[in-house]
Image: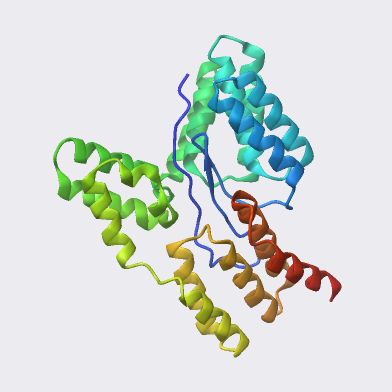
Amino acid sequence: MLLAIVLGGADAVKTRRALHPIWLCVLGVPVLGFSIFSLGAQSFHERGLDAAIEGDWKQAGEYFDQAKEIDAGLAVYWLHSGYAYGMQATQGDDLELQAAIENYEQGIALEPEYAPNYANLGGLYRAANNADAARSAFEAGQDRADRVAIFPLNAGAVAEWNGDLVVANENFAIGLQREPQLHSSIFWTVSDFRAEVIESYKADLPKPELLDQARQTIDNGELALAEDLLADLWQGNPSNPKLYTALGLLARVQGDDVAARDYFQSSLWVQSQFNALKLETILELAALELD
């Protein structure tokens, strides 16, 4: 069985009246989407990650299962549970293999756009001797392959190893264009060449002070300019919770309370990874509920 080891990613944040994406990359299983903030579920999830790091996939799966029981709407818990059961299934347990497939199917139902998840599911189906389902999963992944960075980044890495730095640089640029948040990945610390590539890339990113400018333009009623500024900032660092709070404020001023709530909840989820900056967003979300 082959379980794809991949990097995480997200689509552009400009989509409206939808579940606005955030990103998370752990255990090589990427997830998009957001959920109602749940410290309880996140606590079990973090314990599962610790168990996985120790190689205790049975314990990891149990913790991930507890997380999804609390918050069944977040794809990451289902996908990580499926990954843990898949690792157990490599030891020949057909029941664990079926559990892995069911968890992956549910995770993909919640987050259907990230190609490598289909590669994992296809590998599980192949291990279960279900050739038709495996083919269908692989084809679904191929249809979405041009939206993710893992493929050009891997191609760039191979070109780098072969000494073709021009081709490597071209592929790295494609990967960063598809998933700009990966500019902070440890992928770029592996070699001096990659460090040079990423330093050049970062030099062209929008500056953080633009966030303050965007907030000011919202206050001034310059909503089109604020939207453009926030979209540019998202390209540079989509894991910044302040950015999601600002997007929520913009959506609220525009009268789109559904989008505002989505952005505020996404900000809370991002903040759960950094354990900070919650107060302003909680107050804004509370104010929205009181209106």
Q: Position of residue 147 (x, y in %)?
A: 43, 50
Q: Quadrant of the C terminus?
A: bottom right
Q: Is residue 270 left or right of residue 189?
A: right
Q: Position of residue 200 (x, y in %)?
A: 26, 61
**Residue at image point 48% right, 42% down:** 115
Q: Position of residue 277 (x, y in %)?
A: 64, 62
Quadrant housing residue 59? top right
Instruction: Residue at the far top: name it.
Output: 92
241 in relation to 144, above or below: below
Q: Is residue 273 visible?
A: yes
228 in relation to 203, above or below: below
Instruction: Residue at the far front: name it.
Output: 276
| Residue 78 vs residue 212, the one in the foreground | 212
124 in relation to 47, above or below: above
Q: Position of residue 132 (x, y in %)?
A: 53, 24
**Residue at image point 44% right, 42% down:** 7
**Residue at image point 48% right, 45% down:** 8
Q: Is residue 136 left or right of residue 34?
A: left
Quadrant housing residue 17? bottom right
Q: Is residue 136 left or right of residue 73?
A: left
